[in-house]
């Protein structure tokens, strides 16, 4: 019984968490792509720092999301 419960819980979490991790990988690749074309212009600086900010926000979301999902599943 517990085995079936774990199987369904993991499937439910993976529907939300897997796309978030793919999005985080995409943002990391975008940051790396921006770093390849490094220059001293203001436009580069804005794009670089905004992509780093998006990467940090995405990492925090990926850390907090499982906790939120767990709390939400027990409160229902």
Image (spheres, grey):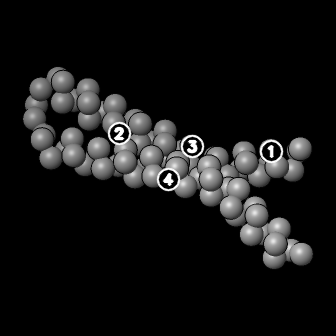
- Distance of label 3 from label 4 (alpha carbons): 10 Å
Mark 2–mark 4 distance (CA, rounded to whole Å): 16 Å
Q: Is residue 7 left or right of residue 15?
A: right
Quick one: label 3 or label 2, which is nearer the N terminus? 2
Q: Are marks 1 and 4 in contact (CB under 8 Å)?
A: no
Q: Which mark is residue 52?
A: 2
Q: Are marks 2 and 4 in contact (CB under 8 Å)?
A: no
Q: Tally the marks.
A: 4
- Sequence-first disc among 3 and 4: 4
Relative image position of residue 57 (x, y in whole percent):
49, 39
Q: Earlier in the sequence, mark 1 or mark 3?
A: 3
Q: Residue at x 68, y 56 (%)?
A: 13
SS class of the residue under badge 1? helix
Q: Which callout, 2 or 1, points to the residue nearer the camera?
A: 1
Compared across the picture, whether 45 is left or right of 23 comes to: left
Residue at the spot of label 4? 21
Q: Is residue 76 above or below residue 9?
A: above
The nearer-to-camera label among 3 and 2 is 3
Q: Position of residue 17 (x, y in %)?
A: 59, 52
N-term-proximal mark, 1 vs 4? 4
Question: Who's the residue at 45% across and 46% down the image?
Answer: 23
**Label 2 neighbourhood size at 10 Å, few (<14), some (14-19), many (20+)?**
some
Side (left or right) of 32 relative to 28: left
């Amino acid at each position: 019984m517990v085995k079936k419960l774990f199987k369904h819980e993991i499937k439910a979490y993976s529907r939300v968490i897997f796309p978030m991790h793919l999005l985080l990988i995409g943002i990391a690749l975008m940051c790396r792509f921006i770093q390849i074309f490094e220059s001293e212009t203001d436009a580069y600086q804005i794009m670089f720092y905004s992509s780093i900010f998006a990467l940090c926000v995405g990492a925090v979301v990926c850390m907090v999301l499982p906790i939120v999902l767990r709390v939400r599943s027990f409160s229902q």
